Image (cartoon, helix red, strand yellow):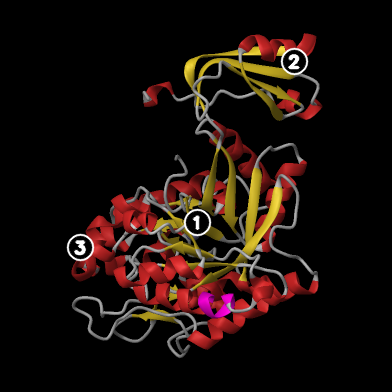
Amino acid sequence: MDPHKLCSGKRIPQASIKDNTVNYILHNAYINGQPQAEAVLIVKNSIVHVGSLSNCRHLAGLAGEEIDLGGKCLMPAFTDAHSHFVEYSKSSILVNLLNCNSIEDIATELQRYRAQLSWPAEWILGGGWNRNTLSNPMTLNKTLVDKVFPDLPVALFSRDYHAKLLNSKALEIAGWDQHTPDPPGGRFERMPDGSLSGVLFETATEMIDAYTKDPPNQVMVDSIKDRVQSIYELGLIGFHSMEHQASAQLLRQAQSQGSLFRTCWHFQAGELDRMIAQEKKSYDGDEFFKIGGLKLFGDGSLGSRTAAMYDPYPGDVENRGILRYHDDELYRLMEKAARAGLACTIHAIGDRCVRQIIDATMRLRVEPAYKNLFHRIEHVQSIRLSDIPLLKSSGLFASMQPVHIANDIPMIHQSWGHIKEEAYAFRSMLDAGIPYAFGSDSPIETINP
Ligand SMILES: [Zn+2]
């Protein structure tokens, strides 16, 4: 099939979808999955017939409106299996450092952002910085940000979201200084004199969330509505989104203001007790908004060298990454969720973490009452080849993001060179019959499928 003939971006006007009164006949297209068919008839937003054009016309009666697709390919819209859609939307209104490859670029972008800020900001948020691309990585610290924002607190996440950069004002608000100990599962970076550099890793990055303040509500809802409009062009109409409760509410607000998309919300660990108390269950919801699973972080990332590995990182014999949970702790958390009818959606990048999640899921599977829950493992960027059959028998669904590969190749050579064949073993996993879905992990990578 000629990919240039993909029917991307053709869409039925939204107003008509809402009023349900118009029947559509889509024709003159290669209909994916049914190449013999000439046309598709849509009545009240549902496909009711796929076949000859004359049959579709007959069934549509007078209320049929025909859309000539000009010989392109017609296929169902894509659903992105792993995104952070509100973060992606917010990236259009927050500091965006994704294209900055030097300290000078970052300083310029911060100045530009300050100059164009159009609402009264209480915190400066955003990010996308990547120390791996900087020639002088340690100069990315609070001092750099203080030069542009001496008066406003700033918290900027790293490209992989496993680190954050704060300025002095933010550290002051949080009350953190050289005497603050590292939290379990996290770290405050320290300067040679012991003072905090402003860079935080893993669980330490979450601790600042208690202090930060987002832009005004409607500014954020508008940014979601704008982003939804733009993803239609890419053939996307739905996404799984890993978000906080407040972000899920923004998605619902955008829907209530007429924005059309389907979403499945995977909630954070801090929200588990409330979800249980409210008797929310996985797969509750309607056509447009469903509850997915409890999103857990099993480990860190390759870029931050915090993905939990069997072998130490080259040149750093002490470092095998960070496992966020002990085996039993992870199992008990999954069991608590499962007892309430909630599945788990667990981030695992390193081979040691992947195995930990397989083992916990196998333990859970013994209980027949939990059989109807579909647990997911997110990313699986490395796996011992001998663990692939175990992954299959665990029943876990693999949610993977091929788009990460291109960016990760240099880091794989650097940090995982010794286990190259285990990195992104997608082919071996698919051959083993492991059920899978692809996603973008937007805004970490482009949402364009
Ligand atoms: Zn993600």
- The residue segment tinted magenta is 361-365
* Quadrant (top left/top right/bottom left/bottom right) for the C terminus: top left
Eye-nearest disc, 1 or 3: 3
Can you give x and y, in whole percent of width and height, for residue 189 in the image?
37, 78
- Say which element carries label 2: helix
Tell me the residue at 73%/49% (across/down).
252
* Quadrant of the image containing the N terminus: top left
Mark 2: amino acid: Leu
Residue 126: which numbered mark, if any?
1
Q: Which residue is mark 2?
A: 59
371 or 163, nearer to the observer: 371
User: Which image quarter: residue 413?
Assistant: bottom left
Left or right, residue 123 beside residue 166: right
Residue 64: where, in percent of width, then height? 73, 13
In screen coordinates, is 194 left or right of 136?
right
Residue highlighted by disc 3: 413
